[in-house]
Amino acid sequence: MIDIISRGGDYQCCFAAKENIVIDTTQDKGGTGVGVRPHQLLEAALAACMNIALRMKAKEYGIELKKVTTSVSLNRDIAGKSIFEYQYNICDELPENVKNIITDIVKHCAVRKTLSKQIEFKEIQ
């Protein structure tokens, strides 16, 4: 699970990771277990995109959100499917109608659109 939290600056966000963002795999798969696993980077990309999209949409309505948290977990346990499970929390008080308009954007963020398309792999030389 990767949690992305908004920071200072318009759309900057961060996630808790090892210093220098070391990428590795788990010990049971031959890695050291130190660092971020590759699938966590996929989770982080989607969570960051959702986080940024929420704040951008709020800004369109003249609302500066103080803190937004988005969480994404990749479930690969279902045969033939990869399911991105997500949640978000806007820590600011907002009228319900405005909150509904703003939060609809998580369904349309750029990374989600990319991951929803048919994917092909092509080696380049």
Image (cartoon, helix red, strand yellow):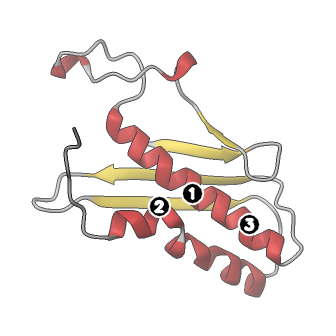
Discs 2, 3 touching: Cβ within 8 Å: no
Pointer 2 residue = 111
Q: Is residue 47 left or right of residue 37?
A: right
N-terminal of the pair, mark 2 or mark 3, is: 3
Identify the residue at image location x=24%, y=58%: 82
Pointer 3 residue = 56
Q: Does residue 18 sit above or below 120 in this rendering?
A: above
Name the element at disc 2.
helix
Task: Out of 116 and 85, give the one closest to the viewer.
Answer: 116
Circle 3: residue type: Met
Identify the residue at image location x=66%, y=58%: 52
Residue 81 percent across, percent down from the top left: 18, 62
Discs 1, 2 touching: Cβ within 8 Å: yes
Residue 43 percent across, percent down from the top left: 43, 48
Quadrant in the rendering for residue 49: bottom right
Q: Is residue 45 left or right of residue 23?
A: right
Name the element at disc 3.
helix
The quadrant in which the C terminus is found is top left
N-terminal of the pair, mark 3 or mark 1, is: 1
Identify the residue at image location x=18%, y=52%: 77
CA neighbours of label 1 inside 10 A, class few (<14), some (14 to 19), many (20+)? many
Circle 1: residue type: Cys
CA neighbours of label 2 inside 10 A, class few (<14), some (14 to 19), many (20+)? some
The quadrant in which the N terminus is found is top left
Pointer 1 residue = 49
Circle 2: residue type: Val
Name the element at disc 1.
helix
Task: Out of 2 and 121, give the one closest to the viewer.
Answer: 121
Task: Out of 22 and 74, give the one closest to the viewer.
Answer: 22
Quadrant in the rendering for residue 123: top left
Residue 29 shows which numbered tag?
A: none
